[in-house]
Image (cartoon, grey):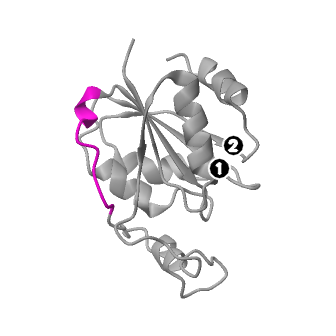
């Protein structure tokens, strides 16, 4: 049995809830990806072209700093990475997280929360950030997703 980690970034708490349910469902460790500078409500206003999130997502090279790193990443074989969908992809802080480690030989499985968007070009944008890792196609969940929903998804992954 390989060791699993559920790492997640949550702007409003929805992704945190799904991540906690996923970690419980599969017996994984959990790690919150926290920005070095927390996002304010104004930062997350996607309708404001000058908001922090809009500026970050408009720049493919943006890499918001993370507050802390997971110090035992070498112990994990499979890493589930959760986030809210922003502009049809993962927030660039997810790239920061992935690029902070040598993930060669590991399996990376993205999962996202969204009120209606799909995964879009998420894998295309994340692949360069985890060279040498096996990046599986992820799935979008909503705030009502249960542990049973998450367990059913895990069963389809053939891990």
- Circle 2 residue: 141
Q: Is residue 99 left or right of residue 140?
A: left
Dividing the picture into quadrants, the one containing residue 10 is bottom right
Q: Residue furthest top?
A: 1
Vertical comparison of 157 with 18: above or below: above
- Residue 154, magenta (yes or no): no
**Disc marking residue 113:** 1
- Residue 81 at x, y percent in the picture: 47, 42
- The magenta stretch spans residue 67: yes
Residue drawn at x 30%, y 51% as measured from the top left: 99
Q: From which residue to which does the magenta span run?
A: 66-75
* Disc 1 secondary structure class: strand
- In the image, what residue occupies the spot 34% across and 58% down? 96
Closest to the observer, 17 or 142: 17
Q: Does the CB distance between marks 1 and 2 fall below 8 Å?
A: yes
How crowded pointer 1 is (Cα within 10 Å; few <14, some 14-19, many 20+) is rated as many
User: In front: 44, or 96?
Assistant: 44
**Image point (23%, 42%), residue name:** 71
Where is residue 72? Give x, y as percent. 24, 35
**Residue 58 placed where, x, y %?**
50, 75
């Amino acid at each position: 049995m390989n060791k699993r980690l559920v790492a997640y970034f949550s702007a409003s708490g929805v992704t945190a809830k799904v991540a906690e349910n996923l970690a419980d469902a599969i017996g994984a460790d959990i790690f919150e990806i926290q920005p070095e500078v927390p996002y304010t409500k104004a930062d997350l206003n996607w309708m404001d072209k000058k908001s922090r999130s809009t500026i970050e997502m408009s720049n493919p090279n943006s890499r918001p700093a993370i507050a802390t790193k997971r110090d035992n990443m070498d112990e994990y074989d499979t890493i589930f990475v959760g986030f809210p969908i922003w502009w049809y992809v993962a927030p660039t802080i997810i790239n920061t997280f992935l690029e902070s480690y040598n993930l060669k030989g590991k399996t990376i499985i993205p999962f996202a929360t969204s009120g209606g968007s799909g995964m879009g070009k998420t894998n295309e944008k994340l692949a360069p950030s985890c060279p040498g890792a096996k990046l599986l196609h992820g799935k979008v969940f909503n705030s009502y997703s249960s542990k049973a929903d998450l367990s059913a998804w895990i069963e389809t992954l053939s891990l």
